Image (cartoon, helix red, strand yellow):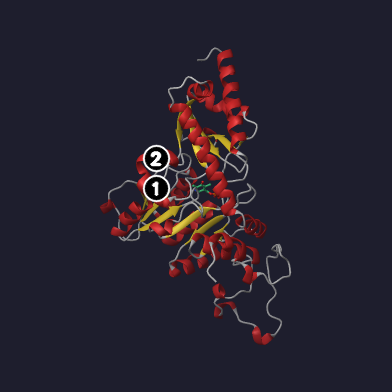
Amino acid sequence: MEVSQRTQAIHADDALNTARDVAPPLHVSTTFRYADDPKDLVPAADAHISTTETHIYSRLTTPTTTRLERILAPLLKAPSLTYASGLAALHAAYVYLNPDRVSIGDGYHGSHGVLEIQRKLCGTTILPLHCSAPDLHPGDVIHLETPLNPTGEAYNIREFAEKAHSRGAVLLVDSTFGPPGLQDPFEWGADIVMHSGTKYLGGHSDMLCGVLATNNEGWLAGLKQEREFLGSVMGSMEGWLGVRSLRTLELRVKTQSENASKLVQWLDICKNTDSEDEEAQLVKSIVERIQHASLQHQDMPWLKQQMPNGFGPVFVIWAKTEGMARQLPSLLSLFHHATSLGGVESLIEWRSMSDRTVDSRVLRVSVGVEDWEDLKADLTRAFKGLLSTQNASGCP
Ligand SMILES: *Cc1c(COP(=O)(O)O)cnc(C)c1O
C-alpha cells in the first residue's frame, strides 16, 4: 500500500514491532543472545549483517536505532544511517568519500572543524563554495548547506548539483535547516544528504543525532561498515527518543515554519512601512535587518519549488548595535536564551556566544510551536524594554 510520508512516520517501522507494545519498547542492551539452536548459528564473517534483522552488538546495530533508520528512509527518500551527532555523521561521510578537494561556503562552524581534521589527516584542499567548475575533479565534494546556519538563507541545490556532476564530483547537502516536509535535496540532484538530527528530527532538545542518507547502495554499505569501526553510533536511548520524535515531525516543522514566516513578515512590514505607528517605530529603532529565505524575493522562481511548504523555522535579526543584541535575549520570557534550534520551544541566541566568526549584532531565532501571536507580543515587550534601558543609559 502506497501511503504518505505522514503515515510512514507512524507506520514505517511496523514490521519491526514484534512486541505487544503500542509505544516502542526501549532496549538498552549492548549485546544480544545468539540463536538457541546450534544449527542456526551463523558466524559474523559468513553473515550479511546488513540484511539480518537480528542484533549482535550495539556498535553494529540496535533495535531502537534500526527502528529509527527504518522510519527515516521513507521520510528522507533514501536508505539512512544514524550517528552519534550531526558532526559524527559528517565526519563519517568525509572519511568514506575521502575527497581531495571540498568546496564549501559559510555555514555551521562545526562543519569547518570537521574539515579541518580531514585536512590535517588527508591534506584535503578547501575551496570556496563559488569556485569555478574546472577547479573540481572527479571524487571531489561540493558541501552545500541550505538553508544556511545561522541566517536561514537558501541556495539553489540544482545549480550546485549540475556543477558537481559536470566534473564527476559529489554533491553533499547539509539539509539540517530543511528537514523532510520542507525540502527534498535528492529531488534536485543531491548525492548524499546529511542532517543534524539533534535539531528537527529530534525536535525536543533532548537528543544528539546525525543522519546520512544516500541512494548509492555501494556507499551505503561502505558507510555502514566503516561506522562499525568509527564507533560513532547513536545511543539506544537517543534512538528511542528519535522514534518518538519522528511521529510528529511534519506537524512540528510545519507549525514552526509557519510561525517563523509570520514573525518575519511582521518584522519586515514594520521595518519597511512609512507609517508612524508605535510598533513600526519600535521595530525600526532596534532591528537593522532581518534575514530569512522567505525574504529572498528575487529567488522565488526556484526557491518556491525547492521549499514548497515553507522556508524553515530559523531566521536572523540584526540588531542596530552589539549592545542591543547582547541584551535583548534577557528581556524575553517565551524565548530561551540558548544555542541550538529545531525544538518545540522557541530559542534566541546572541550568536557571538557560540560562533565568533558571525557579526556581533546577529541574533539567531529558532521558532517553536507556541502560538505565534504570543511570540510576537513577547518580542514587542522586549523591544520596548530594550528601548527604555537604552534611553535610560543615554545611548541613542
Ligand atoms: C547543529 C548543526 C550541525 C551539527 O550537528 P550536531 O548534531 O550538533 O553534531 C551541522 N550542521 C548544521 C547546519 C547544524 O545546524
In the rendered view, does 87 fall on the left or right side of 377? Answer: left
Q: Which residue is mark 2?
A: 296
* Residue 251 % position (x, y): 59, 51
**Residue drawn at the location 54% of the way across and 55% of the way down:** 210
Q: Nearer the viewer, residue 367 or 265?
A: 265
Residue at the extreme bottom = 39
Asked if disc 2 is less than 8 Å from ligand 1, the answer is no
* Residue 243 % position (x, y): 63, 59
* Residue 71 % position (x, y): 57, 63
**Height in image: 236 above or below 103?**
below
Residue 88 visible, this angle: yes
Of callouts 1 and 2, the N-terminal one: 2
**Height in image: 52 above or below 65?**
below
Q: Nearer the viewer, residue 13 or 223?
A: 13
Q: Which residue is mark 1?
A: 303
- The answer for how far apart the CA atoms under marks 1 and 2 are is 8 Å
**Residue drawn at the location 47% of the way across and 48% of the way down:** 111
Contact check, label 1 and label 2, Cβ < 8 Å: yes
- Quick one: SS at disc 1? helix
**Height in image: 264 above or below 168?**
above
